[in-house]
């Protein structure tokens, strides 16, 4: 598991689901298939409201026979744990905050692997992410930091945006249906599994050709913040989108933003207001399938 740079993601945490029904319970609550989850893969997954809006996004994997761990941004963890716990009822599944037991690292420069494949190293796991040579490593909190040069938070955020990927953060809770941040393209939604909260809305968005907003990548002249509104030059009164992720590296700033597709057809997009810093579109590193 060699790599060239690493960053402790101190703004991430871990939820533990333990018990004979852990996989079945999560399967019925999250957007991905946990019933068929093997030990060689992780799952990108979302937790939605009944209206299909994402409350949280996470990565889950089998830590043991009756134990699944979920890594996610810490700012959404407490609310996610509380809401998931409301639905456990008689299921043999105990949910807890295991953040104090684990450290989550972002790695860059690792050997290429298909996204969401998982390698094990004792109690540590390494999950391949979309984007060249990127991975999450989750290891016991008392284990030594992974070898490698220090990586700055801005470099990591830049790479996330460059990969066309964004996580739900506190400022974007309930802002997106999964497809609005290309979640199904990145492997975060199963359309073959049974029901979960919001499933009907998510499926309808997929199959009825109603998607009018998508995650796009832009280059900006100044830094952006998650949750910041984006405006079109021809419509200064109504926001055309919202920043879902952003980072700067080498004097460049990339922004991953959920945006109205119609706003890409002409005019220009700007941060904060119609007269704010301009956003220049950049190609996504993956293809968006045409709507049926």
Image: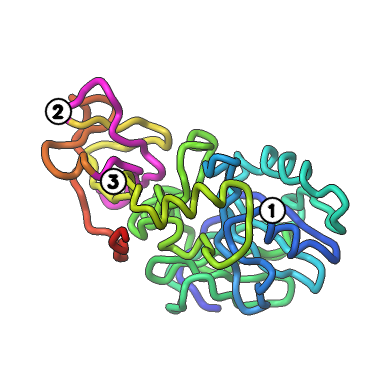
The secondary structure making up most of the magenta span is strand
Dot 3 or dot 2, earlier in sequence: 2
Residue at position x 28%, y 40% from top? 260
For label 2, the SS is loop
Circles 1 and 2, Cβ within 8 Å, touching? The answer is no
Magenta stretch: includes residue 9: no
Judge depth for marks 1 and 3 and give the one in front. 1
Residue 74: x, y in percent? Answer: 62, 44
Q: Nearer the viewer, residue 148 or 163?
A: 163
Quick one: label 2, few (<14), some, or many (20+) residues within 10 Å? few
Residue 48: x, y in percent? Answer: 58, 45
Q: Which residue is mark 3?
A: 253
Instruction: Please report the bounds of the magenta region as a residue range.
Output: 233-261
Count of number-bearing discs: 3
Residue at position x 55%, y 67% from top? 192
Q: Nearer the viewer, residue 211 or 9?
A: 211
Q: Whole-Å distance between the Cαs marked 3 and 2?
A: 24 Å
Q: Whole-Å distance between the Cαs marked 1 and 2?
A: 43 Å
- Spot the residue most to the top: 237
Residue 222: x, y in percent? Answer: 26, 36
Residue at position x 30%, y 28% from top? 239
Judge depth for marks 3 and 2 and give the one in front. 2
Quick one: label 1, few (<14), some, or many (20+) residues within 10 Å? many
């Amino acid at each position: 598991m060699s790599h060239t740079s690493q960053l402790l993601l101190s703004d991430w945490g871990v939820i533990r689901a333990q018990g004979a029904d852990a996989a079945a319970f999560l399967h019925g609550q999250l957007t991905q298939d946990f019933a068929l989850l093997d030990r060689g893969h992780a799952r990108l997954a979302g937790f939605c409201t009944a209206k299909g809006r994402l409350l949280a996004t996470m990565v889950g994997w089998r830590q043991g026979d009756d134990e699944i761990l979920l890594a996610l941004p810490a700012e959404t963890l407490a609310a996610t744990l509380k809401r998931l716990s409301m639905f456990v009822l008689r299921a043999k599944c105990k949910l807890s905050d295991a953040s104090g037991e684990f450290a989550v690292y972002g790695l860059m420069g690792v050997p290429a692997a298909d996204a969401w494949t998982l390698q094990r190293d004792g109690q540590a796991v390494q999950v391949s992410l979309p984007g060249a040579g990127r991975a999450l490593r989750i290891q016991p909190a008392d284990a030594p930091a992974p070898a490698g040069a220090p990586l700055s938070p801005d470099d990591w955020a830049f790479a996330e945006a460059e990969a066309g990927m964004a996580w739900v953060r506190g400022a974007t809770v309930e802002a997106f249906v999964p497809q609005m941040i290309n979640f199904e393209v990145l492997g975060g939604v199963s359309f073959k599994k049974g029901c979960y909260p919001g499933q009907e809305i998510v499926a309808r968005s997929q199959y009825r050709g109603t998607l009018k907003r998508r995650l796009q990548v832009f280059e900006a002249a100044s830094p952006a913040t998650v949750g910041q509104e984006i405006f079109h030059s021809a419509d200064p009164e109504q926001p055309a989108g919202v920043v879902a992720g952003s980072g700067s590296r080498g004097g460049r700033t990339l922004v991953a933003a959920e945006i109205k597709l119609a706003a890409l057809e002409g005019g220009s997009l700007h941060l904060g207001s119609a007269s704010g810093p301009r956003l220049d579109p950049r190609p996504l590193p993956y293809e968006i399938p045409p709507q049926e």
